[in-house]
Image: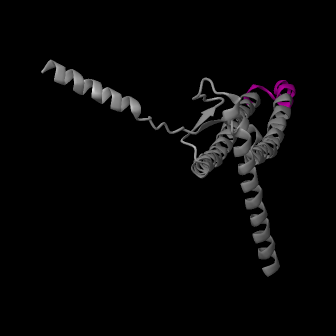
């Protein structure tokens, strides 16, 4: 009985050794997300848009702050001449105005942050969708992300497809921008 089991075991191992194992190659790559977001034209345009808005709205607020500083300086010189009752009343008004300016600065910063955050979230979602579609089209099993939020600790440079993804995203963005420009031109012609 032992000989029969031994012969069966040897037969199975011989048959198993003769079969070639089919190993399917898994196609992987990675994208440096920090480079992608620095070089992606739409991300650059979005950053420039909110920087310009911040500067414009900041200038308006800065003018108010400068007027306040000038009024505060005038208050110092006039306080002695107009008496203590005037100084207390005017001082309270200036404190209230200073507080309002501080709230306005905070509200402006928060508003810009919220608006840019919504657009940036939309941009990131679009990039993820593009990478997913790209991966399916090119037959990748995995595309990893590196950069600020690193999910890959090491990868050979030959697997870096950041430039390909960047080119595809920028081409898509340029095409979309041209389409939007043509729509705007047609709308103006109809007016």
Residue 16 occupies which quadrant of the picture?
Answer: top left
Q: Residue at x 62, y 45 (%)?
A: 124
| Residue 43, position as x, y percentages in the image | 73, 45
In the image, is residue 48 part of the stretch drawn in magenta? no
Q: Residue furthest bottom?
A: 190
Vertical placement of residue 113 versus 4, above or below: below
Q: How is the rendered protein coloured?
A: one colour
| Residue 77, position as x, y percentages in the image | 87, 26
Q: Which of 159 and 104 is in front in this view?
A: 159
Vertical placement of residue 102 versus 172, above or below: above
| Residue 76, position as x, y percentages in the image | 83, 25
Our reading of the magenta stretch's main secondary structure is helix
Q: Could you tell me which quadrant the N terminus lies in?
A: top left
In the image, is residue 76 part of the stretch drawn in magenta? yes
Q: Which residue lies furthest to the left in this view?
A: 1
Q: Residue at x 66, y 41 (%)?
A: 113
| Residue 56, position as x, y percentages in the image | 81, 46
Query: Magenta span covers which residues?
Result: 74-85
Q: Can residue 59 be seen in this view?
A: yes
Q: Can residue 99 be seen in this view?
A: no
Q: Which of 72 and 115 is in front in this view?
A: 115
Q: Which residue is drawn at 71% across and 28% down?
A: 88
Q: In this view, does 86 lie to the left or right of 148?
A: right
Q: In this view, does 161 lie to the left or right of 78?
A: left
Q: Residue furthest top?
A: 2
Q: Nearer the viewer, residue 54 or 134?
A: 134
Residue 172 occupies which quadrant of the picture?
Answer: bottom right
């Amino acid at each position: 009985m032992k000989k029969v089991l031994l012969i069966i075991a040897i037969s199975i191992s011989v048959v198993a050794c003769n079969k070639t194992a089919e190993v399917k190659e898994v196609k992987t790559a990675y994208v440096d997300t920090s480079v992608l977001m620095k070089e992606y034209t739409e991300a650059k345009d979005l950053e420039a848009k909110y920087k310009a808005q911040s500067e414009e709205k900041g200038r308006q607020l800065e003018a108010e702050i400068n007027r306040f500083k000038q009024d505060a300086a005038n208050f110092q010189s006039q306080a002695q001449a107009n008496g203590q009752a005037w100084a207390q009343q005017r001082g309270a008004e200036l404190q209230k105005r200073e507080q309002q300016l501080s709230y306005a600065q905070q509200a402006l910063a928060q508003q810009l942050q919220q608006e840019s955050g919504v657009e940036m979230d939309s941009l990131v979602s679009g990039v993820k969708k593009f990478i997913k579609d790209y991966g399916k089209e090119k037959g990748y099993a995995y595309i990893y992300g590196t950069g600020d939020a690193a999910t890959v600790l090491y990868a050979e440079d030959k697997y870096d497809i950041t430039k390909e993804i960047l080119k595809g995203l920028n081409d898509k963005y340029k095409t979309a921008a041209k389409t939007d420009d043509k729509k705007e031109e047609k709308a103006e012609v109809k007016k």
